[in-house]
Amino acid sequence: MLQPRLSVLGFRSPLFNANLFPVARVQYYSTSIKSFQVAIDGPAASGKSTTARAVASRLGFTYIDSGAMYRGLTLKAMAWNLDPTKDAQTITNMASQTNFAFRTPQLPVDQLDNARTAITHVYLDGVDVTDEIRLPMITRAVAPIAALPSVREVLCSKQRAIAEGKEGQPPPEEASADSEYAMFLQEKIELEKALFTATSEGDFAQVQSLKDQIKELGDLCAELAPKDVSPESQVPSGVVMDGRDIGTNVLKQAHLKIFFEADPLVRAKRRLEELQRKQSKGDLPDLETVLKEIEARDLSDRTREVGPLLKADDAVVVDSSNMSLEDQIQTTEDLVRRKMKETGFA
Ligand SMILES: Nc1ncnc2c1ncn2[C@@H]1O[C@H](COP(=O)(O)OP(=O)(O)O)[C@@H](O)[C@H]1O
Ligand SMILES: Nc1ccn([C@@H]2O[C@H](COP(=O)(O)OP(=O)(O)O)[C@@H](O)[C@H]2O)c(=O)n1
């Protein structure tokens, strides 16, 4: 059973937009505009997200972090005290009903420091969960949820929709809190927070009552959500998506596929350095623990039946064990630019 320890999860300021409840949206898609697609896969801490984000930023492409979606769903499942061995269907329904969105701030693209420290904001139903989804308890719990075939089906289809610009628009930076819709949404988020606390305290009467209220408010918000979007402008000129099964499954037709490799010990050292950078105080694991966790997650990711971590036959392998981050980014950017020329995109 997943243990929630939910008191540490604090939702931050809610932001609002038209895309929080996709059921209420009117959508018009253009099929004539096609993006250049780059699929990046590889094991944990091989440099996928840092490189993918930097390259996307240099090329003006959209970056999609598929792992953040599995992490986000894990966060939500833990908040509702769900167990992947027993509650697969509920977790799958939760995945379908969740709106996932990203925002990567545009930073000067030539500075390596920016590449190292840049973050992509991740929104679950309009709520910024960027920090919460990186908590070690989420990292430890994500693999069994990501192994559920029905969950993968839902999230992979959402990932394709985001790549095509049909979903995943982030909430506006300036939230407009004056509409009735925004007011109800704010209330719903407050109740979600109360639900986290009630679940962690085992107050089951309160949990049930909160769930009922959240459901009612959710229905109301879905009705009131602004329905007009202009999807034509949402189709990105290019996308870089990273994960485990992007080249083999999600974006099988990607124009370029890259598979990052790196020695497990090198990856563990990088992850530990990252933890040290982010977390100046508190309990830091030792190198051996980080290495063990990385190896366990790699094994689970490589051996699951659906969507395993696998190099696509047509993927270019980049082993970054002895590469600086700068070299890894430059090598990837060069591969993308070359392929864009070959395929008539540049
Ligand atoms: N080639 C590299 N050299 C040194 N550090 C790297 C390199 N690639 C990535 N890193 C660092 O390693 C850590 C893990 O990289 P990340 O992009 O999060 O990996 P992934 O997305 O594959 O899990 C980050 O702190 C990143 O800055
Ligand atoms: N396309 C993907 C991406 C991530 N995942 C799962 O989500 C977990 C977290 O992905 P991540 O990319 O955030 O992980 P890190 O490599 O950054 O540690 C992975 O260990 C996989 O179990 C997946 O199954 N398929």
Image (spheres, rainbow, N blue to C red):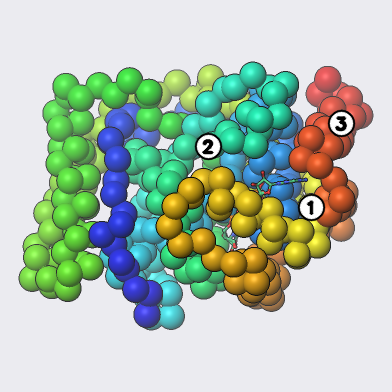
Badge 3 or badge 1: first in the primary sequence: 1
Q: Are the residues at dot 2 and dot 3 in contact (C-beta closer than 8 Å)?
A: no
Cβ of mark 1 under 8 A from ligand 1: yes
Residue identified by numbered label 2: 120
| Residue named by callout 1 | 260
Q: Residue 210's quadrant in the figure?
A: bottom left
In the displayed structure image, the side of residue 328 where residue 58 appears, left or right: left
> How far, Cα to Cα, is label 3 from label 1?
15 Å
Q: Amino acid at mark 1?
A: Phe
Q: Which residue is mark 3?
A: 334
Residue at 51%, 72% (x, y): give it.
144
Secondary structure under tag 1 reads strand
The alpha-carbon separation of the residues under discs 2 and 3 comes to 23 Å
Crowd rating for badge 2 (residues with CA inside 10 Å; few <14, some 14–19, many 20+): some
- Say if mark 1 contacts mark 2, CB within 8 Å: no
Which residue is located at x 59 percent, y 67 percent?
286
What is the x, y in percent for residue 199?
21, 67
Lower position in the chain sequence, tag 1 or tag 2: 2
Say which amino acid is labelled 2. Thr
Q: Are marks 3 and 1 in contact (CB under 8 Å)?
A: no
